[in-house]
Each structure stands twice: as C-alpha cells, then as structure tokens.
Image (cartoon, helix red, strand yellow):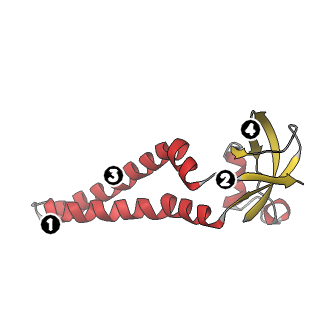
Amino acid sequence: MIEETAIVARIDAQTVWVDSRRSGSCGGCRQQNACATSLLDKLIRPRLIQVDCALELQPGEAVIIGIEEHSLLSASFVQYGLPLVFMLLGAGVADQLLQVEQALRDLLIAGVALASLAASLALISRWQRGFLQAYLGRPVVLRKA
C-alpha cells in the first residue's frame, strides 16, 4: 500500500474529498524560482481527490490516504502506455493504407499518429471520471495523521 498525507477538504456521505499537496524537497529547494516543477505546481490549480472513508472526519483534518500498488501500476499503464500503443497503431495503420508520394506520406503518417495520440488521451480522460476509477480502485483513508 502506498501512503500519502492529505488534508480533508469536504465530506459527502461515505466519500471524502482531500487535497494532497506536493511535499518534500519542493518546499525548501534553493532553485525553487528556476525550477519547472515548482512553476507548474504554482500554475496548476489545486485538485481535490475523491477517497473512500469509514472514519468520522471534519474538514481541515490531516489524514493518511493509501492506494494499492497494483491499482497504481494499472492506472500508470492506462495513462502512459495505452496512448503510446494507440499512437503506434495509428501510425502503423496509416503506413499500410496510404498510397501517396513519399514526402507527403511521412507527413500524413505523423499526423495520423498525433491524432491517434490526442484521441486516446481524450478517451482516457473521459473514461477516467467514471469507469476507470471504479475498476482500478480509489484511494482510501487509512487513519488520521
């Protein structure tokens, strides 16, 4: 089980919404002003994560959340591996089907590969909201911090 500290943002019935902030070296690094990770962390709005909980909690409390390793590995494959597979399949299909001159052919294959990548990312994003979270599992609140 992989664990992380989070802050309870809001509570709905059996579901708790937590805010898991980036911690560790980003807070005290000397290169914080020149670091791309630090810059992205400042630009991207805070994102609440829905977790299952059986404990009595109040907003603002610190909790330890956890997720199973196999769920994290499966989600990583879906997020990173599947788009790559779709992109390569799109390029392979385009390579087999296109019957045009060489210069235009390479450009069209690259375009189809990028379109396949974009389509797979959009599809995964849509699936992630419902089906994938239920299938791959959600984090759970393990205990109060």
Alpha carbon of mark 2 to alpha carbon of mark 3: how far? 26 Å
Q: Secondary structure at mark 3?
A: helix
Residue at screen point 61% across, 62% down:
72
Alpha carbon of mark 1 to alpha carbon of mark 2: how far? 40 Å
Alpha carbon of mark 3 to alpha carbon of mark 4: how far? 40 Å
- Which residue has dot 1 on it? 102
- Which residue has dot 2 on it? 40
Q: Residue furthest top?
A: 12
- Which residue has dot 4 on it? 14
| Residue 11 versus residue 22 in the image, above or below | above
Q: Amino acid at mark 2?
A: Leu
Q: Which is nearer the N-term, disc 3 or disc 1? A: 1
Q: Position of residue 53 (x, y in %)?
A: 76, 45
Q: Amino acid at mark 1?
A: Gln
Disc on res. 23: none
Q: Which is nearer the N-term, disc 3 or disc 4? A: 4
Residue at screen point 57% across, 47% down:
134
- Which residue has dot 3 on it? 115
